[in-house]
Amino acid sequence: MDPVLPAREAGGKDPMTHRSDNRVRRYDLVTPLIPCKDEIMAKFERILMSGSFILGEEVRQLESEMAADCGAADAVGVASGSSALFVALAMAGVRPGDEVITTPYTFDATMEAIVLLDAVPVFVDIRPEDLNIDPQLLEAAITDKTRAIVPVHIFGAPCDMHPIEEIAARHGVEVVVDMAQAYGSYYDGKPVGAYGRLNTVSFYPTKNLPGIGDGGLVLCRDTDDAERIRRIRAHQTVRMNGHLYTGWNSRLDEIQAMAIRVRRGRFEDEQRDRDQVAAIYDSHIPANHRVRLPAGQGMKTAHHQYWLRCNERSALATTLDEAGIDTAVYYDPPLHRHELAEYCRVSGELVQAERAGREVLILPIHAALPFADAERVGDLVARHLAATVDNP
């Protein structure tokens, strides 16, 4: 797509102040809002004068649209992606003492939601090609205490859902999917939200479909789950599977829902630009250094982040930093090395998660990143890898 905004010029903007500088930034939270600003401000004034601030028509419309987008029967807006995880696990019947199998290579919120329910996170290793949970290791981790499996579509790459669902069904285990980074991703030709009993969504401002603050959503295969979640998010208790779940405040407000809906209207254009940045990187970076999706047709990553492997990660990060390019390291150390690990169990060796923690580097990718900047980043990475003979 040809550039249409001033921000497409080479160089970045400070993500908070929109100040021009010469660095290639990992995020630009302001430029994508410029085409939406007038619409957001007009709708904000309408909401302000309506007196309907929480769980109103904007929330109801967002829930309906997200369910349709993601192939779900219903959707329920909640206060954050973290809250979505907590309530989804509760709806899956997770109780104190239960075990929940998940990946150690993800954000803390996945583990925290399990621990907050007084359940036990059980970590299994990831696959090197996509950094997602390895389905081949799941059965060895299942015990008579296992209540659920929580795959995480890390950085937007879809987990291999067919074997995960088959294993879960064979053992009578629920599948609750953390798709905080994967709105816009597809597995076997369907939106990733079409798999699993429940999927959790985050609208944090850095996500592909962002709000202007915190917000989350639970996608439900069963409308009964959705109705129970609507009770819990508004301080009402729910009794299920012989356990009483306490309600709390997890309501999505109208302003967030409105802003998310406005951004949703531009999502396809922004996703095309993000995909183009990723394609530029792919053209420069050898395949053995970057993501490889599950085999089959209809697989697509939303490119929430663009990662590559590098044995000498710090050297590459320094090279890029000196050239005015921001990078980041995620999930180093993995969750089984965190303080909360005393509440967790590890199944097998987590060799690939440890390796990813040491080797993975995140490059800039967002809808406002100038393609010329992406070419420069890709070229610098390729030249660095060639000069160092780096083979992960």
Image (tube, rainbow, N blue to C red):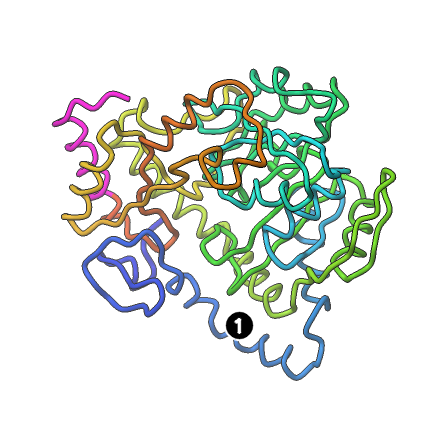
- Please say whether residue 216 is one of the residues in the magenta stretch: no
Among the 4 quarters of the image, the one containing residue 71: top right
The boundaries of the magenta stretch are 375-392
Q: Secondary structure at mark 1?
A: helix
User: Residue at 37% across / 63% down in the picture?
Assistant: 31
The residue most toward the left is 387
Residue 239 place in picture, x, y as percent: 86, 47
Looking at this view, is 268 or 31 the one in front? 31
Among the 4 quarters of the image, the one containing residue 150: top right
Looking at this view, is 1 or 349 the one in front? 349
Q: How many marks?
A: 1
Residue highlighted by disc 1: 39
User: Residue at 41% across / 23% down in the picture?
Assistant: 352
Q: Is residue 2 left or right of residue 165?
A: left
Does 350 sit above or below residue 116?
above
Say what amino acid the circle numbered 1 marks. Glu
Quadrant of the frame with the C terminus: top left
The residue most toward the front is 342
Residue 380 place in picture, x, y as percent: 17, 38
Does 75 sit above or below residue 111?
below
Packing grade of label 1 (10 A; few <14, some 14-19, many >=20) is: few
Q: Is residue 3 left or right of residue 141?
A: left
Q: Is residue 341 left or right of residue 270?
A: right
Among the 4 quarters of the image, the one containing residue 320: top left
Does 268 sit above or below residue 357?
below
Q: Main secondary structure of the magenta part?
A: helix
User: Residue at 65% across / 69% down in the picture?
Assistant: 254
Residue 4 place in picture, x, y as percent: 34, 59
Q: Is residue 336 left or right of residue 323?
A: right
Does 23 sit above or below residue 281?
below
User: Residue at 21% across / 63% down in the picture?
Assistant: 21
